[in-house]
Image: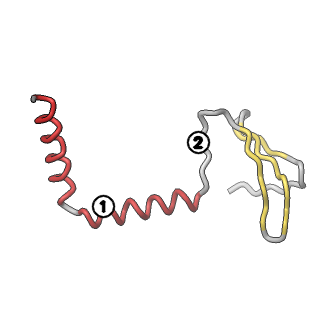
Amino acid sequence: MLVLTRRIGESVRIDGDIEVTLLEIKGDSVRIGVKAPRETRIQRTEIIEAVVAENVSAAAETGDDAEGAIVAALARGRETRTR
């Protein structure tokens, strides 16, 4: 991991077209701004981790029934289209 020191208002560039600017320091919180191309996905790590954990939990609850549920849903879809 590259560690940089920045003051408020200073920026770093990533890959030429992504700019991260230090906006504010308040107590133990730091506000940053990110300028990036529209197609660049910017996500908070804790949100990604929560979604992954939820998906793993849901998959574990479903277990082997998931394949059967998918096959049944596809079959229902075929029946609807052929009528």
The residue at which mark 2 appears reads as 41
Name above or below for residue 18 compared with residue 9. above
The quarter of the image holding the N terminus is bottom right
Badge 2: residue crowd in 10 Å (few <14, some 14–19, many ≥20): few
As drawn, the residue found furthest toward the bottom would be 27
Badge 1: residue crowd in 10 Å (few <14, some 14–19, many ≥20): few
- Position of 50 compared to 70: left or right? right
Is disc 2 placed on a helix, strand or loop? loop
Count of labels shown?
2
Residue 14 rendering spot, x and y as whole percentages: 72, 41
**Disc 1 residue type (three-letter):** Ala
Q: Which of the numbered marks, if any, corresponds to residue 59?
A: 1
Name above or below for residue 22 compared with residue 13. below
Q: Earlier in the sequence, mark 1 or mark 2?
A: 2
Q: Which of the 4 image quarters holds residue 24?
A: bottom right
Mark 1 → mark 2, Cα distance in angstroms:
25 Å
Q: Residue at x 74, y 39 (%)?
A: 35
Residue 64 rendering spot, x and y as whole percentages: 18, 60
Q: Nearer the viewer, residue 74 or 64?
A: 74
Is disc 1 placed on a helix, strand or loop? helix
- Position of 76 compared to 36: left or right? left
Q: Residue at x 80, y 55 (%)?
A: 4
Residue 55 rendering spot, x and y as whole percentages: 38, 59
Q: Which of the 4 image quarters holds residue 30?
A: bottom right
